[in-house]
Amino acid sequence: MTNNVDIKELLSSAGGLLSGHFCLTSGLHSDTYFQCAKLYQYPDVVEKLAKELAKKLENIEFDTIVAPAIGAVIFGYEVAKQSKKRNLFVERKDGEMQLRRGYTLAKGEKVVIIEDVITTARTIFETKEAIKEFGCEVVGVGCIVDRTQGKLENEFKIYSLLQSSPVTYEPDNCPLCKQGIELVKPGSRGGK
C-alpha cells in the first residue's frame, strides 16, 4: 500500500491481477499475471498511480521520462505529467527497441525509465541500450509492479508502487504444465 492507495486492490478492481497459468514475457511460467494495460481503461486510476510514483521520484534529479512501447507509454506519459518532466518513448523496430520519431536526448541528460511491470528487466535493459548512443544517464527506474525480488539492485535503483515475489517456473519444470492447465500468454510480445 502506498499512502492510502492500495495498488493490489486497484489492479484487482480493474481486472489487472490475473490467476491461472501464464507465460511471462521473460519466458518463465507463473500462476499470477499483472495485466497493467487493464488499468489504462480508467484515466483516474492511472493518474492516481502516477501521482504516487511521482512522489517516490521527487528526490531524484532527472530531466526526462523514457518508457518502452507499448505497455508503458500511457503510464510513462502520466508520470511525466505528474513530475512535470519531458516524456519520450522507445519502440520496437526490426526486433530492437529504438528512440524514433525525431526524439533525441542530450549528452548528460538524466533519464528515469518507466515500465508497468518488471520481472527480469529485459525491456529495461533494451530501453537503456536504445538510448545509450545519446550519452544520457539513467538515474532510476520506476514501475507499478516490481517482481525482481531485489535481484537488480546492482544494476538499477527501482522505485515501485508494489513489490511482488512471484512464483515462477522454468518451462521445462513447470508443475502447472504437468497438471495440464492451459498456458496463456497475455503479454505484449505475441500475447492477447
Image (tube, helix red, strand yellow):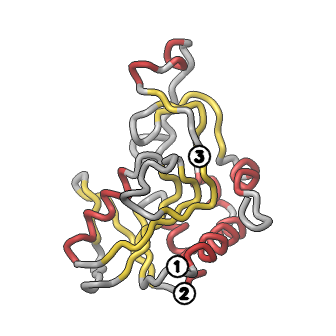
Where in the figure is residue 185, as x and y percent of width and height? 48, 35
Q: Quick one: label 3, few (<14), some, or many (20+) residues within 10 Å?
A: many
Residue at the spot 56% in from the left edge and 33% down from the top edge = 167
Residue at (44% x, 76% y) in the render: 65
Where is 112 relative to 83, above or below? above
Which badge, 3 or 1, is on the more N-terminal residue? 3
The residue lying furthest to the right in this view is 4
Question: Distance between the Cα atoms at labels 3 and 1?
Answer: 22 Å
Taking the image as shown, residue 170 lies to the left or right of residue 137, namely right
Residue 134 quadrant:
bottom left
Q: Secondary structure at mark 2?
A: loop
Tag 3: amino acid: Phe
Image spot of residue 179 (x, y percent) = 56, 12
The reply to whether dot 3 and dot 1 touch (C-beta < 8 Å) is no
Q: Give the residue at x 69% y 47%.
A: 15
Q: Amino acid at mark 2?
A: Lys
User: Disc 1 marks which residue?
Assistant: 80
Kind of residue indicated by mark 1: Ala
Image coordinates of residue 130 in percent, x first then y, are: 26, 65
User: Residue 101 is drawn in which quadrant?
Assistant: bottom left
Q: Which residue is mark 2?
A: 84
* Tags 2 and 1 touching, CB below 8 Å: yes
Q: Secondary structure at mark 1?
A: helix
Q: Is residue 146 above or below residue 22?
A: below
Q: Which residue is mark 3?
A: 34
In the image, is 89 to the left or to the right of 85? left
Give the CA distance from mark 2 to mark 1: 6 Å
Q: Secondary structure at mark 3?
A: strand
Q: Nearer the viewer, residue 175 or 21?
A: 175
Earlier residue among tags 3 and 2: 3
Residue 69 place in picture, x, y as percent:
41, 61
Q: How many marks?
A: 3
